[in-house]
Image (spheres, helix red, strand yellow):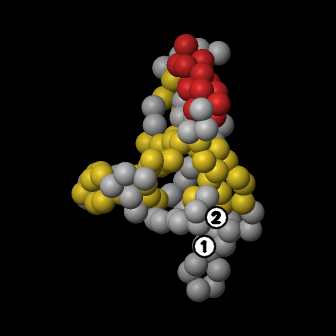
């Protein structure tokens, strides 16, 4: 493992042990139905750091919007797509406005995923 991967793994362990992580249900889209709505046949419960802070972010299209929640997945195996649906432990959800995170320079793989919800 690289230094970055080790640091993210430590952050994951520490935030879990301190009870700073919450459960998030991730549903992957399997396409659309005949009405143009996404179909979500399966869901997976994930642990993540959830920050319910209002902040202005710039979307991938360059538009300034208000994000109500950021979700940080400290597991590089978790991949989030804009067509996914994320539901917080309290039942709230929202459109995915932006997906970010940094790449581990040693492995050239995503080290963590940060998702901003509207």
Q: Quadrant of the C terminus?
A: bottom left
Please give left or right for residue 68 compared with residue 7 in the image. left
Residue designated by label 2:
29
Depth check, front residue: 57 or 109? 57
Q: Residue at x 43, y 42 (%)?
A: 100
Q: Residue at x 64, y 50 (%)?
A: 23
Q: Which residue ends up furthest to the bottom in the rendered image? A: 35
Task: Please say if 5 is above or below 88.
Answer: above
Q: Mark 2 or mark 1, which is nearer the start of the sequence?
A: 2
Question: Where residue 113 appears, x then y in whole percent?
Answer: 52, 40
Question: Where residue 58 appears, x then y in whole percent?
Answer: 28, 51
Depth check, front residue: 44 or 30? 44
* Mark 2 neighbour density, 10 Å: few (under 14) some (14–19) many (20 or more): some
Q: Which residue ends up furthest to the front in the rendered image? A: 18
Q: Residue at x 48, y 65 (%)?
A: 94
Q: Can the viewer see residue 53 in this picture?
A: yes
**Image quadrant in which you'd find residue 68:** bottom left
Please give left or right for residue 47 compared with residue 104 in the image. right
Task: Please say if 25 is above or below 102.
Answer: below
Task: Please say if 34 is above or below 109.
Answer: below
**Image quadrant in which you'd find residue 11:** top right
Task: Please say if 57 is above or below 100.
Answer: below
| Contact check, label 1 and label 2, Cβ < 8 Å | yes
Count of labels in the image? 2
Question: Where residue 82 appears, x then y in whole percent?
Answer: 50, 58
Q: Secondary structure at mark 1?
A: loop
Residue designated by label 1:
38
Depth check, front residue: 103 or 46? 46
Depth check, front residue: 39 or 4? 4
* Mark 1 neighbour density, 10 Å: few (under 14) some (14–19) many (20 or more): some
């Amino acid at each position: 493992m690289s230094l970055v991967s080790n640091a993210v793994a430590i952050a994951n362990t520490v935030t879990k042990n301190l009870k700073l992580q919450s459960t998030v249900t991730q549903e992957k889209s399997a396409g659309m139905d005949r009405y143009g709505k996404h179909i979500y046949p399966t869901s997976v419960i994930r642990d993540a750091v959830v920050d319910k802070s209002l902040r202005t972010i710039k979307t991938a299209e360059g538009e300034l919007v208000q994000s109500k929640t950021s979700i940080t997945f400290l597991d590089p195996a978790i991949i989030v797509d804009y067509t996914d649906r994320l539901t917080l432990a309290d039942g709230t959800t929202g459109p995915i406005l932006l997906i970010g995170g940094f790449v581990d320079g040693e492995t050239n793989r995503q080290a963590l995923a940060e998702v901003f919800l509207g």
